[in-house]
Amino acid sequence: MAVIECVPNVSEGRRADVIDATLDAIRSVAGVRLLDHSSDASHNRSVLTLAGDADAVRAAVLALFDIALRSIDLRAHRGEHPRLGAVDVAPFIPIEGVTMAECVELAREVGAEIAARHGLPVFLYEEAATSPSRRSLEDIRRGEFEGLATNLADADWAPDFGPAQPHPSAGAAVVGAR
């Protein structure tokens, strides 16, 4: 049996209704298990851990983006943790019966789908990165949501998928494999 873990970080740690909606989105997908979640009001961030096979994890991550992008507006978001997007980062991690190469392929497929579905710039990082300058999450997050438009105006900052301009309320997303 193939098991992939994903640890998406969502830029919401205060509004219980939004956090519950993100958890429900994941729980609604057959074949995926929500293993853990934690929210921090100071950071205004929630970290979710889910696992399943590639199809279930893909469906859960897409459902998470669907609800988070409807519910989170970074123009009004404040918190201590650096963030670039409503769903800030979504790494895929091989656990059992799956290779890193398969997680890289999944990250690229999901990143492309997120960009197409939501008009959201998506950057690939870690093992899925398309250039050495994109391996580090910290480097991609530099400037955060508030500096994203300026960063995307630079050709070196062209996203891997989606438009070279931030989504007005959701910013951008970072998807990868590690």
Image: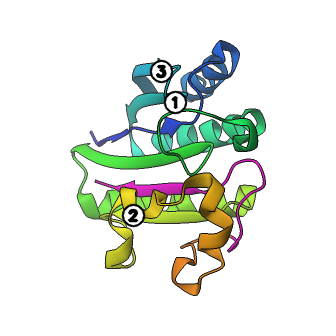
Q: Do labels 1 and 3 touch, CB within 8 Å?
A: yes
Amino acid carrying mark 1 in the image: Arg
Position of 72 relative to 55 (above/below): above
Q: CA distance from mark 3 to mark 2?
A: 23 Å
The residue singled out by tag 1 in the image is 45
Query: Up-down: is 81 above or below 175?
Result: above
* Residue 116 placement, left or right of 143: right
Disc 2 element = helix
Q: Residues within 10 Å of mark 1 (few under 14, many from 20)?
A: many
Residue segment shown in magenta:
163-178
**Which of pointers 3 and 2 lies earlier in the amino acid sequence?**
3
Q: Which residue is mark 3?
A: 40
Name the residue: 51% across, 65% down: 123
Q: Quadrant of residue 25?
A: top right
Residue 86, position in %: x, y? Answer: 63, 42
Mark sitting earlier along the chain (2/1) = 1
Residue under the point 44% across and 30% down: 47
Residue 139, disc:
2
- Amino acid type, label 2: Asp
Camera-side residue of 42 and 109? 42
Q: Residue at x 27, y 39 (%)?
A: 1
* SS category of the residue bearing label 1: strand
Cα gap from disc 1 to disc 3, whole angstroms: 6 Å
Q: Is residue 166 magenta?
A: yes
Residue 64, horizontal then vertical, whole percent: 61, 36
